[in-house]
Image: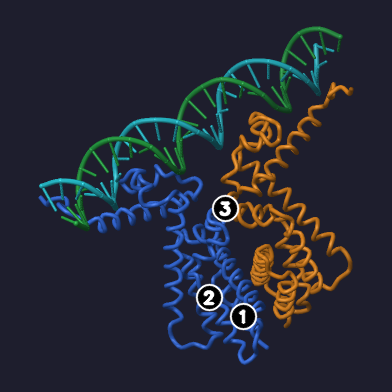
Chain colours: A blue, B orange, C cyan, D green
Amino acid sequence: MQQESPRRSNRERSDTTRAAILDAARGLFVAKGYAETSTPDIVSAAGLTRGALYHHFEDKKALFHAVAERESRDVAASIEQATADGLTARDALKVGGRAYFEAMREPGRIRLLLLDGPAVLGKHAMMAIDAANAQRTLEEGIAEAMAPTVVPADKLSAMASLLSAAFDRAALDIADGASTDLYAETIGTLIDRMVST
Amino acid sequence: MQQESPRRSNRERSDTTRAAILDAARGLFVAKGYAETSTPDIVSAAGLTRGALYHHFEDKKALFHAVAERESRDVAASIEQATADGLTARDALKVGGRAYFEAMREPGRIRLLLLDGPAVLGKHAMMAIDAANAQRTLEEGIAEAMAPTVVPADKLSAMASLLSAAFDRAALDIADGASTDLYAETIGTLIDRMVST
DNA sequence: GCAATATCATACAATCTGTATGTATCTTTA
DNA sequence: TAAAGATACATACAGATTGTATGATATTGC
């Protein structure tokens, strides 16, 4: 019979309990929503107590922030991986969009990142979480796709924001049963026409 | 000195207290958000007690639903008024969009309809509230603008959804300080190119 | 090895939500 | 029109939740 773990470093202890809390919280936030999920539920699912939770996280909102942040990083990683190779800017936008749809099909991400996130953390915090760079990536993609035409920065920003909103809505509709292919094609046409001079 | 109101019908009593609760709730939901607003706060602001609130509304969520519904009706009325005259379908889309931006500048509407609404009531309930017809109106406008080209229903639905998402995002960005003219122009171009055959 | 600190559990105070109950006012009807 | 019932609203209560304060145990630095 093995000893339970005669000596674990603080770092190691913190990492495992933080991960346990994050995992349990994510599961419940996804299943019941942020508001309907209680901290007793979370720590109970994690096999801990509320003391651990409030030691590692400022409050319930900070815990949600950490969950959303990790989720957003995972989404960003999926997209980055899909668009790694040498594509034209226009194709990179389309391929990245499809990768985004695919990533957002992971159950719960819609709720975490598109529904509860903006309400709980505010639009500004969600934008900061949003890979912190999705907007910039889109702007660069659009600018490159429209080259050599030069678009003013504010106009470019507006186009990127609108395109990003379209991607988000597409993910929502797809989660509601709409066809991924239909939306990929519709957005593809939208991109083509938007960047055409 | 006037008598306070020696006799008021039940209908009249209900209407005034319902309105008082709705007004107070709207103000607090807008100022602090749904989650941070307590029912004691609401009825205190309305000069009533929680008994009245729970008599007229099933629960706090139902009260929010009523507030959001009224707000959405007001927005829809503004748009309808702006697009009443005989415009081409394409222009009606643009004018309607601008009217939407203008209507959404009314403080609080962003938070009620675009941030808290989807999280508190769910995407489905918000779509049902959404004038119940905004999506349909957009679909008709797009179809008419693209005539005589005939677009399959599901594709039309996708286009309308994406356009609606763009309008929502534009309203959000404008509330954050972006230029209304810039977004009106950018979306106008988007519409032109989207409906061009 | 011992003080200092980090990790986590337990206990507590302040709210908040929804319901149950009570009272006054209005409406129906015999 | 007077009693009976329904409606409008206030008050009281039970259960649950959040954040904090305090306590115990394990780890780390000196």
Distance from disc 2 to disc 1, alpha carbons, whole Å, reads: 10 Å
Residue C24 position by quadrant:
top right
The numbered mark at residue A191 is 1
Q: Amino acid at mark 1?
A: Ile
The reply to whether callout 2 and callout 1 are in contact (CB within 8 Å) is yes
Please name the residue that numbered disc 2 is placed on. Answer: A97
Mark 2, secondary structure of its residue? helix
Instruction: Give x and y (percent) for residue B146.
Output: 76, 77
Labels 2 and 1 in the same subunit: yes
Q: Residue at x 61, y 37 (%)?
A: B39
The numbered mark at residue B144 is none
Mark 1, secondary structure of its residue? helix
Q: Residue at x 89, y 66 (%)?
A: B85
Q: Residues within 10 Å of mark 1 (few under 14, many from 20)?
A: many
Q: Residues within 10 Å of mark 2 (few under 14, many from 20)?
A: many
Q: Is residue B130 above or below residue D21?
A: below
Labels 2 and 3 in the same subunit: no
Camera-side residue: A54 or A96?
A54
Chain letter for the residue marked with disc 1 in the picture: A
User: Total number of numbered labels?
Assistant: 3
Q: Residue at x 64, y 84 (%)?
A: A195
Distance from disc 2 to disc 3, alpha carbons, whole Å, reads: 24 Å
Viewport quadrant of the N terminus of chain B: top right
Instruction: Give x and y (percent) for residue A48.
Output: 31, 45
Labels 1 and 3 in the same subunit: no
